[in-house]
Amino acid sequence: MTRGLTAYAEMKDSGVDWLGDVPAHWEVRRLKSVVSQVSEQTDERQESMPYVALEHIESWTGRVSLHFAESAESQLKRFESGDILFGKLRPYLAKVARANCRGKCVGEFLVLRATNWISEHFLEHLLRSKPFIDWINSSTFGARMPRADWQFVGSTKLAAPPLAEQTAIARFLDHMDGRIQKYIRAKERLIALLDEYKQALIHQAVTGQIDVRTGEPYPEYKPSGDEWPGTIPSHWDVMRLGKVINLTVGFPFKSEGFSHADEDIRLLRGINVAPGQLRWDDAVRWPASDIARFAEFQLSAGDIILGMDRPIIGSGVRVAMVNESDVPSLLLQRVARIRPIEGKLTCEFAIRLLSGSSFSDYLAPIFTGISVPHLSPEQIRGFRVALPSLADQEAIGEYLDSIADRITRAVSRARAQIALLREYRTCLIADVVTGKLDVREAAPELPGTNAIGREEDGVDTIQAESHSHRAGHSIAEEANA
């Protein structure tokens, strides 16, 4: 991507720790000498303008989602098109954006307006570069809510070339950012397609739509007698889930008895159950000396866990299998433990059945509770399932395991490529805005840009999407081979 770029011919010591050497013709100044900090306030009840909070700005990219709803703040800062919004709360998040319209923002921003000495477009890239962010972050105060102070930010020295060169740098970086973002979007679409393909295969296999041994429908089907599951393979049986599982709901441990000592036993709460995995980053514990009283609620590797409060979220059903690393642990209320009855249902078939669309479709209309939808044990047991023989369940599990392994490897590769692209983008911006790479010859050769400085990408986006679909079908062919 950076073929032909070279270092500047003549460099000088900037005298600034975070900058190092800079091109000899670049000028070093303090930030507060080239921008003004804007603190003009507005009463939002009298002015209808777009509203921006920290959560509306994407870290490191500067992409902003504008909102017109009223905020909880009565007094807000006004900004104009071209102003730079610099998030001073947790500056390591790099919430830095250049406004392309008038609006208002919360007080956790520094609103900076460039003078004639510096281009706001170049300034945006510079203030969001990793060297600058790291330098500002080193100065923050406050342990839980670190903030940057304007006195430090404004006193920070930066270097910039003449305006024409600043424009060339900004144009080059916009072009490169556009290309990198296209590659990232293509990889993200590929990951989504692979996940959709995996879920479709699981659904077809556990509902009998395909015979995993042949990849084709079963030879004979019969009506199940219910709208769900409808028509099923002739040798499958329909029954309620409660007939093939043992279900236990967690104990109502009192919060005043919770412990945070590492030697005590973790309590598995609903907050720890995510689609496909258990998460212990927010864990509470119970005294280990008291564990004997709760033998019934001890978890074992292979147990299936279902969150009963808000069981469906955007990424799927909150159901997961307990691994060796998850024990010892105890089951807390509003979480269900499901143990398949040996000889009737395998754990692998059960977890895929419960994480699939059939179970979520069953759950959606039967939730109780207004603010937090939840399930009862009777509703879980009442789920009607179509079950093959134990041998068929094992065959389905082996087939899906092999497909899942291939898809997981493909997704891991795509995610690693995304991480590398983002790292490359970060390094490229840092090298260009601090004068380590000369883009003066490359910038004039770039394609045209649109009105906001972003390269037009309609055709390339379509091509990237087509590539993602082809890649998804390629994995599908490999999985079915």
Image (cartoon, grey):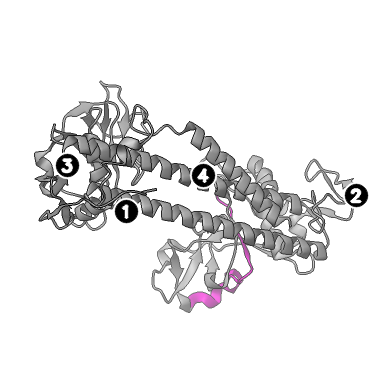
Q: Earlier in the sequence, mark 2 or mark 1?
A: 2
Vertical order, 133 against 370 (above or below): below
Q: What element carries label 2?
A: loop
Instruction: Using residue 240 as the reference point, say whether residue 367 is left or right of it.
Output: left
What residue would you read off at disc 3? 161
Q: Which amino acid does label 1 sit on?
A: Cys
- The disc labelled 4 sits on which kind of residue? Ala
Residue 52 location, quadrant: top left
Residue at horizontal 51 percent and vertical 48 percent from the top: 187
- Disc 2 residue type? Glu
Which label's residue is closer to the chain start, 4 or 3? 3
Mark 3 secondary-structure assignment:
loop
Distance of label 1 from label 3 (alpha carbons): 19 Å
Q: Measured from the top left, where is residue 68 in percent x and y?
A: 36, 27
Closer mark to the observer between disc 2 and disc 4: 4
The residue stretch that appears in magenta:
290-311
CA–CA distance in space, label 4 to label 1? 21 Å
| Residue under pointer 1 | 427
3D distance between C-alphas at marks 4 and 3: 35 Å
Tell me the residue at 30%/22% (across/down).
Answer: 48
Is tag 1's residue or tag 3's residue first in the polypeptide sequence?
A: 3
The answer to whether residue 330 is above or below residue 189 is below
Query: Label 2 to label 1, Cα distance in Å?
Result: 60 Å
* Residue 442 circle label: none
Identify residue for label 4: 186
**Residue that label 2 marks:** 220
Mark 2 or mark 3, whichever is nearer to me: 3
User: Looking at the image, is mark 2 or mark 4 earlier in the sequence?
Assistant: 4
Q: Do the residues labelled 1 and 3 touch (CB within 8 Å)?
A: no
